[in-house]
Amino acid sequence: MRRRPALLLLAAAPLLLGQAGPRLVPDISARNIEIRYSFTGAQLLLFGAILYSGGRVPSRDLDVAVVLKGPVQPMIVREKQKIAGIWTNADSHRFASAPGFYAVASSRPLRDIVDERTAAVYELGLQNLQLSPGSGAQADKERRFESGLLDLRSREGLYAENPRGVEISDGVLYRARIFIPSQVPTGTYETETFLIDRGKVIAAATKEVEVRKTGFERFVATAARRHGFLYGLAAVLLSLGLGWGTAALFGRRG
């Protein structure tokens, strides 16, 4: 019976040690982003505080990296070649899952604050995204299409890195701005904040953001999803009507 307090103390030791480290208290400027007909993009502010045990800020500087990742979805990448003066689809590759949007911002370049293993585990940086390729592809083909996907998404503004995008004030407060382009896919996004010390992640926290269409855009998207045939038929009739109206208008002017 005398051993029980010691055993209880030993059992609680990991919990007490876990509480000794710093922790993150993150927040975001908007939990919902609405896409309307006039939507041209949005700036999302990710901010928060670093809470230290005993309220003592360490003498050495810590780093922060924030990630905004969009819904994971299957994706097909096509490779085009110019044959007889005409660009045609020469090859294609299917990814079973890839984020529709990915942006990372950090207080310093990622290569300076995390080692390769840590960056790979937490998917910090475009080169560390864990893309799931389709089955049966050769390794060299997978690498070629992965590089093509990263380049394409980066040029579209859907994948981005900002090596100086996080500001830290007095070692306690941090903030970062991430731009969300107009062509961003809808769905549930996850923000991840990482506190980094000497190459290792010592604390992490997450929040969710919902990107959705509203108004007429939502009606059109819902109709296209639920009534594909009728939506396609309506689109064809609308195109024919616009074409006939344009021809009639210019015919009268002539």
Image (tube, grey):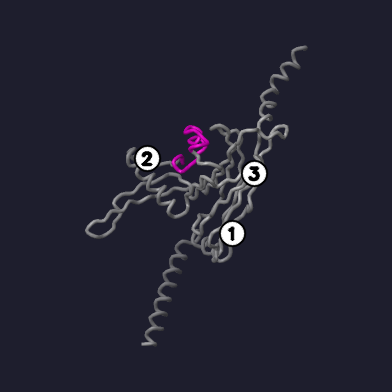
- Given contact means CB atoms under 8 Å apart, are the residues at marks 3 and 2 in contact? no
Quadrant assignment for the C terminus? bottom left
- Res 131 label: none
What kind of residue is marked 1? Glu
Counting other residues with Cα less than 10 Å from the Cα at mark 2, is it few (<14), some (14-19), or many (20 or more)? few
For the residues labelled 3 and 1, the Cα–Cα distance comes to 31 Å
Q: Residue 217, percent across and down?
A: 54, 64
Q: Residue 145, percent across and down?
A: 36, 45
Q: Nearer the viewer, residue 43 or 235?
A: 43
Residue, far left: 84
Give the number of callouts: 3
Q: Is residue 119 magenta?
A: yes
Q: What residue range appears in magenta?
A: 111-129
Q: Which residue is mark 2?
A: 135
Q: Nearer the viewer, mark 3 or mark 1?
A: 3
Q: Is residue 250 above or below residue 166?
A: below
What kind of residue is marked 2? Ser
- Res 169 label: 3
Q: Please tell me whether mark 1 sits on a helix, a strand or a loop.
A: strand
Q: Please tell me whether mark 2 sits on a helix, a strand or a loop.
A: loop
Residue, far right: 2
For the residues labelled 3 and 2, the Cα–Cα distance comes to 47 Å
Q: Residue 135, percent across and down?
A: 37, 40
Q: Nearer the viewer, mark 3 or mark 2?
A: 3
Q: Which residue is mark 1?
A: 34
- Given contact means CB atoms under 8 Å apart, are the residues at marks 2 and 1 in contact? no
What kind of residue is marked 3? Ser
